[in-house]
Amino acid sequence: MILQTLKAITFTTMSSPSDIMGHGSKGISRAVPIQVNPRVSNVKSVYKTHVDVIRYCKTASKRLHGVDEETEQKIFTEERVEMLKELSRKPDIYERLSLALAPSIYEHEDIKKGILLQLFGGSRKDFSHTGRSNFHAEINILLCGDPRTSKSQLLQYVYNLVP
């Protein structure tokens, strides 16, 4: 059996504007067998994947709570800001945040810390005075591991956490 990466997915919408569909859209996926010849009852073992869109909800940066719908300003009370400042002063903040990341997944503390660093990103460095160009502030990680090490679950948790 030869496995291939899916190249494209067809979206089918009924009486819906199709310009809102894009990367990351959710839907119901089903496999449709392809018949080579309509007179022959055999079908190819290759399936064409497409998504039937039943209902859609356009989401954007307001995925998480805390954004005012009218002004599109983030809503943080003074108490919340003070609590976050106090939390940032704790010496074990790195361990606390890594334990709070995907708490239902046990162990894998090093992986959680790597994902946590990627969430916060790096600081932009300027090496123009040495003749080198600027470096990216984003941190990229390569997450490899044995099967059943919760790689997909950790990344899915982070995807749902961050807008």
Image (spheres, rainbow, N blue to C red):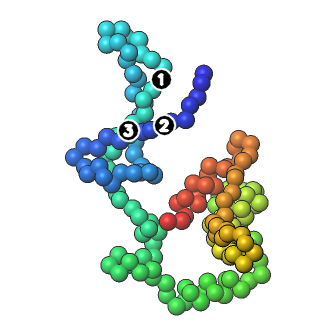
* Residue 121 visible: no
- According to the picture, the residue beneath numbered tag 2 turns out to be 7
Label 3 secondary element: strand
- According to the picture, the residue beneath numbered tag 1 turns out to be 46
Q: Residue at x 59, y 60 (%)?
A: 158
Label 2 vs label 3, nearer the camera? 2
The amino acid sitting under disc 3 is Thr
Label 2 secondary element: loop
Residue 121, placed above or below residue 152 = below
Q: Residue furthest front?
A: 131
Q: In the rendered view, does 53 fall on the left or right side of 24?
A: left
Q: In the rendered view, does 47 fall on the left or right side of 100?
A: left
Q: Nearer the viewer, residue 61 or 56?
A: 61
> Crowding at label 2, few (<14), some or many (≥20) Cα neighbours within 10 Å?
few
Q: Residue at x 31, y 40 (%)?
A: 12
Query: Which of the labelled discs sits on residue 10, or is there none?
Result: 3
* Residue 147 visible: yes
